[in-house]
Image (spheres, rainbow, N blue to C red):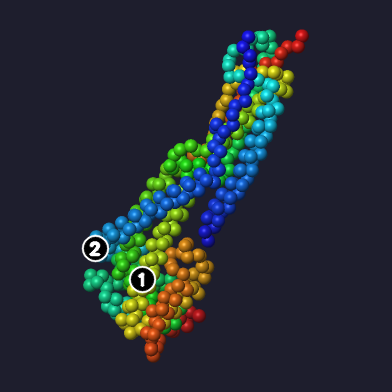
Amino acid sequence: MYLDLYIFAALLVLGFFFGRLAEKRHFKSILDREQKYRQLLTFSGRLLPPGMDSADAELVGGSVVISIDYFKRIAAGLRSIVGGRVTSYESLLERARREAVLRMKEAAIAKGATMVVNVKLETSSITKGKGQQIGCVEVYAYGTALSPILA
Amino acid sequence: MTKYENRVIPEGINVSEEHPLKEFLVLVFGLGAITALVVLLLSFAAGWLVHFIPFSLEKSLATSSFATNNTNDVVLTKEQYEIEGYLQLLANKLSVAQNLPEDMEVVVHYVDSDTINAFATIGGNIIMYRGLVEALPHENALAMLLSHEIAHIKQRAPIVSLGRGVAVGLALASISGFGDSSMSHQLIGNVGLLTSLTFSRDQEEQADVEALQTLKNYYGHALGAESLFETLSKGDYALKPPKLLSTHPITEDRINRVRRFNEGNIGRASYKPLPDFLIQVAEGFD
C-alpha cells in the first residue's frame, strides 16, 4: 500500500545523494583539468592568429552526454510550474559544456596542437520520453586544432 | 602584436551557489500549500453548492446510473428478499429516529457478496453486503451501521463527494498539466488526495455522531454500537494505514467515541438479537 509513494521518496533521496556526489566530483575534475590544459589556447574566432598561418590545421572535437538525477528532474518539473531559473538544468549544461571543451582539448593535445580556433558548441537533449521529459543532454565541442610545423 | 591568451573565467556565473534542497523545499511546500488551498476552497464550495441540488434531482441521477449498474438486475432468492425487506424496515424506523427530512427516502439494496462492507450512494441508496451483515453480532450493531449510512444520506455526503471529486479532479489536472514531469503530477495528486481524505474523515466522524444519537432515540441507548467497528477492523481493514492516509477515522478513536457517548447512559440496557433467518444465513455460510 502506498508503494508508489515510498518508491518515489526512495528515488528522490537516492537521486539527491548520488547526483550531488557525481556533480561535486565532476566539477573538481573539470577544474583540475582546465588548469592542466591552460597552455592550449582556444578561440571562437574564425581567422588564424598572426604567425599561425603555416601551422597544420585539423578538425578536433569532444562530445559528452550527461544525465540529470531523479531529484533534479523533479525539482525542474516543479520549477516549470511557477517559472524562474531552472538551476538544476543550469549546472547540468555547465558541466556538459566544460567537459566537452576539455575533451576537445585532450584530442587537440594528442595531435600536438598548441591552439584551437573556430571553436563551436552544439547542444541537444537526448531523451524526450513520456511527457517530453528532458533526461540527458549531449554537448559537442569542435574546432580547428593548429599544430606548429617543426622545421 | 596583440597578445593572445585565455583568461581564467570566474566561477559561479552559470551555476547557482544556493543549496538545491533549499529551492526544492520552497517549491514543494509552496506548491503543496497552493494545491491544498485550491482543494480546500473547491471542497467547501462543492459542499455548499450541493444544497442547491434538490434531492429529487439526485434521485433521478441515481436511477439512471443504477440502470447501467448491475445491482438491480441480480435476482435475489426468497431468503435474500426477506433479509432485504427486514433491512429496509429497520432503515425506515431508523430514518424516523434520525429525523430524516420528509422528501428524503432511503432504499436498501442487499448484495450477495462476501465483501465486508456497506456504503451509501447517491439518491438515498444504501448497499449492504452479505459479508458484513452476517458478521455483525446483534441488531444494535446493524442499526449502528444503517444509521451511519442514513446519516451520510442526511448529510448529502454521496452527492457532495461526487461534486467534490469532479471539481477537485479537474482543478488538479489543470494545475499539474503545466509541469513537464509526470512525478510532479503525482506529487500534486498526492497533496490533493491527502486534503480530500481530511474531508472524508470529517464526514465519517459526523456520521458516527449522528448515528449514535439515532440509536439513542431508537433504543434509548447506544449499547453495542462499538461492535460494528470491532467487526470492521477484523475484516477488510486488517491492514491499517496511518490516519493521514485513511478515508475513515481510526477504529480505536471510533470505539472510544462510542464509549464516551455511552458513559453513565446505558443502565440495564441489553442487546437485541438479530432475527432467526439472518442468523441461519450466517451459520449456513460458515
SS state under label 1: helix
Q: Which residue occupies the extreme bottom position in the image?
A: B268
**How many labels, in total?**
2
Does residue B283 appear in the picture of this structure? yes
Q: Along the line of sight, which residue is nearer the eye, B45 or B64?
A: B45
- Where in the figure is residue A19, as x and y percent of width and height? 61, 43
Instruction: Report in which chain the residue with disc 1 lies.
Output: B
- The amino acid type, in three-letter code, at marker 1 is Ala
Quadrant in which residue B214 is drawn: bottom left
Position of residue B261 in the picture relative to residue A142 (left or right): left
Q: Along the line of sight, which residue is nearer the eye, B38 or B72?
A: B38
| Label pair 1/2, CB-CB below 8 angstroms | no
Specify the label residue B54 is tagged with.
Answer: 2
Residue behind mark 1? B207
- The amino acid type, in three-letter code, at marker 2 is Pro
- Where in the figure is residue B198, as x and y percent of width and height? 41, 62
Check the picture and name the quadrant holding the C terminus of chain A: top right
Q: Residues within 10 Å of mark 2 (few under 14, many from 20)?
A: few
Which residue lies at the image location 52% right of the left edge and 70% below the top edge?
Answer: B238
